[in-house]
Amino acid sequence: MKKIAADAPQTRSADIVAENVERLKALFPEACAEGKIDFATLKQLLGGEVEEREEKYGLNWHGKRRARQLALTPSTGALRPCPEESVDWDTTQNLMIEGDNLEVLKLLQKSYAGKVKLIYIDPPYNTGNDFVYPDDYRDNIKNYLELTGQTDGENRKLSSNTEASGRFHTDWLNMMYPRLKLAKYLLRRDGVIFISIDDGELPALRLAADDIFGEENFLACFVWKSRQNKDNRTLTGASVDHEYIVCYGNNIRGNVRDQSQYSNLDNDSRGDWISANMVGIATAERRPNLHYDLVNPGTGLNYGCPRMGWRYDRDTMARLIDEKRVLWPANPNGRPRRKAFLSELESDFTGFSTFIGDYIFTRDGTADIDALFDVRLFSFPKPVRLITNLIEQGADGEDIVLDFFAGSGTTGHAVMAQNAADGGKRRYILIQLPELLSTENRDQKTAADFCDRLGKPCNIAELTKERLRRAGNKVRGENPMFAGDIGFRVFRLDTTNIRSWEPDRKDLEGTLLDGIDHIKPDRSEQDILYELLLKLGLDLSAPIETRTVAGKQVRSIGAGVLFACLDENIAREDVEPLAFGITAWRAELTPAGDSTVVFRDSAFADDVAKTNLAAILEQRGLGNVRSL
Ligand SMILES: C[S@@+](CC[C@H](N)C(=O)[O-])C[C@H]1O[C@@H](n2cnc3c(N)ncnc32)[C@H](O)[C@@H]1O
């Protein structure tokens, strides 16, 4: 049985550098020698496309290299579950994560890379009055705990980024760049990101986003008329009545089909077409209405049902057949496909104006939140309707919507409201810093007093959670027929739960700590389960089932992808019944791939018990056995 050592992949968030190298290797195997990239060969393979001049076009600032590096450094933190602060913990698919978004975005990579359909963010605009989070590349988790008042010692204060700092745009870019880079990895291939901003950082944001997402993936810069009445207080005298929402796709070129592939072999009056796939992506348990035998009414040939069903329900399919859009293969073992006409090619943005002037103003955002509370808690939240408009365009079905500068939680509210409006099952992931609120600060006093009244710590993440609780009830109250998800699971960023996984403990491994418990004493079994789950790349809302096997509590996570028994005592006589019980349970669940089984290293009575347990499990097909 192998112990998960400090340098094992399971102790870290995703290793993005290693993934980048793998991608290059797959594209250019000849530029790879003994596991390393041969840069000279790679350059040769790219011909004249390599930019080698020192003065290149693009955005540069002091710290860019470090900012890029910061995104690539794995996190050693963990997300600790907080069921008591959550709503509908057992059933909800929504997540509210309290923490610094840089570390959290790193921790989410293994489970959510390529899975998020829509990201909306409303970062600090860098007006000079807002604070810009200062990352510390040496130990960002310690930095986070200090900045948010979660350490015993002297806490450092978050201060606003003023123009007098001399590094005004630099500080903002250093903060934004690694976060946007990590966000890109989370986006699905057809995903989109919307970023709110004003004139102050629009130019820097556009250039940074061009750099990260690619200029060719720029979709639109929406102008939002955000105020109705003139503002007479500006320095220049001009009343600035708008903000921007900058939008990039993840892979526009890959998604927009090459028009040269369309043709009109059968002289269809609707013009050129290509044949498109109609096979679905959901199992029969999830979408039973998409699983049925497809029969050609003209010939009576039955084409059966693919394993993942069809993309359309029976009624839609009947209409497609009626409109002669279905292509029937002669062989019943073939798959019927659909005619997709060039004239009907649509994107998420077809017909969408880049001017949002339809009377949704900043003050509506204030009214939305005022309707939930009896005091004014948050300055300038975005209007729910502004965000539902974006969500309606860019996400549907069970798509994941992410906001990693959640503030008062408007995006979570908007996801629930839009689901209630159109019956969607979109899920949200929100990330918010527990930014401290002080009763001594005039602007924060009302919110801080409110937290005190609730008996909660005084920070913005508490406001986010309370808004989500109240917004969920309001959406349900206003839509009595809506049976969708109004819950959320809360997680909190912290240091790892496993002592020996901490980077500065590496030296002790195998000596001092061997034989003693590596799990930190103040951490619960649930903390450890969720750390394992995330580092194995499972969904944070994956189901966890508990059974008693040979008198020990065993958990199955993600229907048998991971089994964990963190009991503190495993005697020699427990070994056989425990191993048999786990393998029988796995046989019942039949997970698609390998399963990992994890035990507490210090639990075994002796080495014989440990070795025997691993051997029995291996004999029965469970070779991935680890200890903590
Ligand atoms: C402009 S507000 C977002 C408002 C939000 N759109 C709404 O409608 O309520 C930006 C938020 O980002 C949070 N924030 C700033 N830096 C952060 C970081 N490093 N990690 C997580 N949240 C952060 C701030 O605390 C602030 O609440």
Image (cartoon, helix red, strand yellow):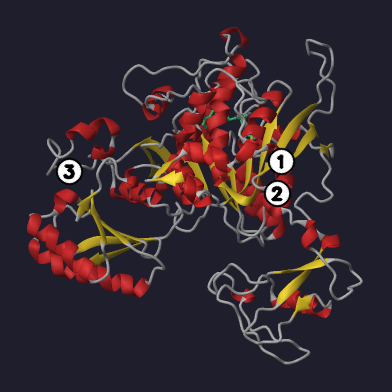
Q: Where does residue 139 sit, x and y in percent of width and height? A: 37, 26
Between the residue at mark 2 and the residue at mark 3, the CA separation in whole angstroms equals 52 Å
Q: Which residue is mark 3?
A: 517
Q: Residue at x 17, y 33 (%)?
A: 508
- List the single residue furthest toward the bottom: 300
Dot 2 or dot 1: first in sequence order is 1
Q: Residues within 10 Å of mark 2 (few under 14, many from 20)?
A: few
Q: Which residue is mark 1?
A: 216
Q: Nearer the viewer, mark 2 or mark 3?
A: 2
Instruction: Tell me which amino acid carries mark 3.
Output: Asp
- Residue 253's disc is 2
For the residue pair 412 and 49, the one nearer the viewer reads as 49
Instruction: Tell me which amino acid carries mark 2.
Output: Arg
Dot 3 or dot 1: first in sequence order is 1
Q: Residue at x 83, y 61 (%)?
A: 342
Instruction: Tell me which amino acid carries mark 1.
Output: Glu
In the image: residue 160, left or right of residue 272: left
- Residue 67's disc is none
Q: Where does residue 258 sit, x and y in percent of width and height? A: 75, 56
Q: Residues within 10 Å of mark 3 (few under 14, many from 20)?
A: some
Labelled pair 2, 1 in contact (Cβ < 8 Å): yes
Between the residue at mark 2 and the residue at mark 1, the CA separation in whole angstroms equals 8 Å
Dot 2 or dot 3: first in sequence order is 2
Taking 309 as reference, is 594 above or below it?
Answer: above
Q: Quadrant of residue 46?
A: top right
Does the Cβ of the disc 1 residue fall within 8 Å of ligand 1? Answer: no
Q: Where does residue 567 sit, x and y in percent of width and height? A: 20, 55
Q: Secondary structure at mark 3?
A: loop
